[in-house]
Amino acid sequence: DVKVTQSSRYLVKRTGEKVFLECVQDMDHENMFWYRQDPGLGLRLIYFSYDVKMKEKGDIPEGYSVSREKKERFSLILESASTNQTSMYLCASNRSRGTSGYEQYFGPGTRLTVT
Amino acid sequence: AQTVTQSQPEMSVQEAETVTLSCTYDTSESDYYLFWYKQPPSRQMILVIRQEAYKQQNATENRFSVNFQKAAKSFSLKISDSQLGDAAMYFCAYRSSGNTGKLIFGQGTTLQVKP
């Protein structure tokens, strides 16, 4: 079974703190993604990575950065957390090629509250 | 840019009955993939069904089937013999044929199943 894990299910941080959200996948997937989920807006792509040290901005990258030093790990960084970054954050991964390459596998999500 | 629209924020169905969730999308591409994902309460998002745009035949997976109307850019999900475990938020998603695997999600539809 593909497994995507995220470092925390719930996180409470203060405004201005630097926040790290970690995601690990165990299926040797090339692509990894960070989404933000908000009611009525669905999932919006923050950043994605198609290879180690490679990254591309998604639709809402402002206020976020990412790091992918190893193939299995993709980190989302909030440099200075703000209250409008309170949300559910979902990590996902998939292969870039092959018949099974089109399904994204999701982690359980991290519900971040910034106070 | 592609967009995905789910116009039904909430739906409800009686157990054992059939329900259809709507999804429309906008794209200028001819080759793409469409997905329905299920997100149960407090659980991970999982793939329900996938449709390749080049296939005319509608995809089916047990009690789940789609009505794919390419010309109308419509992709609805039909759940037959609804079960209590079907209660979840359902997301429609679009993916271009390129290999980055990026998904564009709709806003989501919360399905309630009444016993």
Image: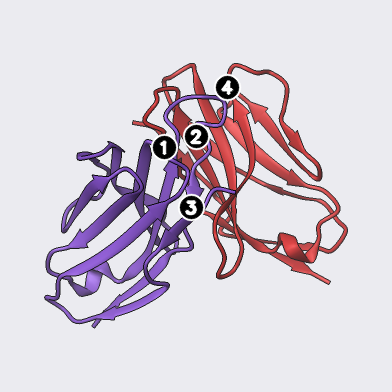
Chain colours: A purple, B red
Separation (CA) of disc 2 from disc 4? 12 Å
Give the CA distance from mark 2 to mark 3: 22 Å
Mark number displayed over residue B25: 2
Label 4: chain letter: B
**Amino acid type shown at disc 4:** Ala
Q: Amino acid at mark 2?
A: Tyr
In the rendering, at what x and y percent does residue B2 appear?
39, 32
The picture places residue A76, in percent across and down from the top left corner, at 25, 57
Residue wearing tag 4: B53
Q: Residues within 10 Å of mark 2 (few under 14, many from 20)?
A: many
Which residue has dot 3 on it? A106
Does the CB distance between marks 1 and 2 fall below 8 Å? yes
Answer few, some or many: residues within 10 Å of disc 3's Cα (few below 14, many 20 plus, some between 14 and 19): many
- Residue at 57%, 65% in the rendered image: B43
Q: Amino acid at mark 3?
A: Phe
- Label 1 chain ID: B
Rendered image quadrant of residue A22? bottom left
Specify whether disc 1 shares its chain with disc 2: yes
Residue at 60% across / 43% down in the picture? B36
Q: Nearer the viewer, mark 3 or mark 1?
A: 3
Q: Provide residue B62's location: percent of width, then percent of height.
A: 81, 42
Q: Secondary structure at mark 4?
A: loop
**Image position of B96 with respect to A43: above or below:** above
Q: Which residue is mark 1?
A: B3
Say whether marks 1 and 4 touch (CB < 8 Å): no
Q: From where the camera sits, is residue B111 visible? A: no
Gap between marks 3 and 4 measured at Cα: 23 Å
